[in-house]
Image: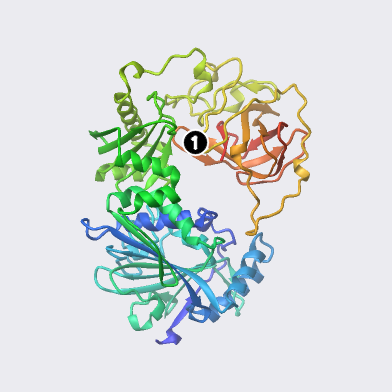
Amino acid sequence: MKENILKWHFPSTDSGDEDGINDPLRETFEGDHERYIARESIQNSLDARKDKTKPVLVKFERYNLPVSQVPGLSELKETLKRAKEYSHDQDKSEEFYGSALELLERPTLSVLKVSDFNTIGLNGSDDDTGGGWYKLTRGTGVNAMHGVGGGSFGIGKGAPFAASGLRVVFYSTINQQGEHVFKGKARLSSFRNAEGDVRRGIGDYGQAINRGVSSIREIENIPDFFQRKEQGTDLFIVGYRTEEQDWTRLLLNSLLNNFWAAVHFNELDVQLFDNGKLIHQVDETNLGELMAEYASEAHEFYKAITDPTAHMKDTLPHLKEVSLYVRTGEKLPRAVQMMRSSKMVVQTVTNYRVLPQPYVAVFICDSEQGNRLLRELEPPAHDKWDRDRNKVFGKKVYRELRNWVKESLRSIADEKDSQPEDIPELSRWLPEDVERDDINPQLGSIGLKTDAISNLETAREIGANQKEADLGASTTKPREVALTQGFARGGEATPIGIKPVKNKSHNATIDLTTSGEVPRINTANIRFRCREILRDNRRMFQATISSSHNEAGAIKIMAVGDDADYPVELESVFDGNNQPLEVNGALIKGLELIPNESIRLIIELKNHKRYALGVE
């Protein structure tokens, strides 16, 4: 191998924008690495299936790689040191670069290799903007339909960097033309090189050319460990971050919860290896057994397909071929899992209140047209269908989907129970079940006094064009927020006029976990109620929390909608003694809960919009 022609290259900023330590492409997937790695890699491998009569095979293999085999090791170390020095005043910089450099001083480095088989590989030259290789290794925010590291918006490729302790990933493919192609990518922060020039933090490892590097396309120049043997794509996460001794358990939980249907329909097989030893094989023959052990919640949905009460099929105007599997039974969560033809769970919806008995259901859209429409409604994380992402047809598609699922569920209800019982005053305590697209969001039109309680229902973000007086809002208690399964249910709120229980949570001492993360409160033990108020003409929320157990740590505040729940950015949070609490994104930190004692929080969101708030 010609070592002298291979190198790392970080382009000059030319006095332009610099890269900070908080990379938005990576930050989107920070946290639950195994969940995102499984979702982002498998879904794109399924999109790139070569032989439709055979399943795609995805292998997750963890290796202890000698550090000396990391391509461009000496250059990478020097770059990390310079980036650490240049960004020393940025939050997280010292922590990340110190840890990364320490990893490179060890004799071996953990590497996660993700490989797909029965796939077409990544085609195209470095400059072919329509090719999969370009979209994966160079494009940002572009559609990358194929390969392990892509995604519908090209943002899913940030997930592997979030799982790397070095923020370094290598790609290797054999494409349809039989070409071997290899390249490395680092997503660091800007630094000043030895000549004093400020360089970008996003760089590539490849073959030296005039003003940078190109992908390596000669097999003799590709390091042996990174050479692909057959058509398809390998992705290497260097410095793989996992705090779990049994790392396979986390990946199994993610892939089974997200892709159980693809395995069941024989479209996907998965293997997990640790240093060459097969730990788990996942296919349709052992799926049920594995789900019972590693994915108990998704297991109920799996049984809706294997043992359905009813199975409906239809052809709709926009979505075309769709199907719904329904299973009824005791203690089921009344929820529907939504999927496209890739058989990945996009979201779980819990607001179809048209079937009296408990149930689980699985919706699948199998048509090419329907998949294209639904894909365009998905955010970068592919975890919901948002009608507002396409202003032309988004609402039409969303309404068509919603109405068909509701009518299908109604059709299997027992005759006497085919309509829900009409209980007076019930509606004020339940989420709104109709679409409202014409409501005025302007805060100033409410006209409430300071700290007055707004009795407007807030089950979703409010739209535009209609005055608040037309809402028909309740005039007594605000309803309890309806939360999706897995969220804490609401309890009794402390009235505004009653002195709250003294809360010392802002002085609580919380021990960090071994990974340095703030511990999370077990929301199964708490009661949470929230209502909207105005203070100094700003929309805020008053929340009351109590617990059946001693709890200390953080909670995450979520906006609760009809079809999905998502974290909200917090501006500030004060306790009942008007003391500020520490917030980070959607997290409220430093809470201390005592059994049978309530605490009151005043929450202000950064965007000041109206939501129903819940706790993850």
Image position of 481 with respect to 35: above or below: above
Instruction: Count numbered badges in the picture.
Output: 1
**533 or 309: which is nearer to us?**
309
Image quadrant in which you'd find residue 17: bottom right
Residue 519 drawn above or below residue 516: above
Local SS, label 1: loop
Under mark 1, the amino acid is: Gln
Quarter of the rendering containing residue 594: top right
Q: Quadrant of residue 534?
A: top right
Name the residue: 22% across, 59% down.
Answer: 51
Q: Residue furthest top?
A: 424
> What residue sits right under mark 1 in the picture?
485
Image quarter where the C terminus lies is top right
Residue 148 in picture, x, y percent from top left? 37, 61
132 relative position to 482: left or right: left
Residue 380 on image: x %, y %: 44, 50
Say whether residue 129 is visible: no
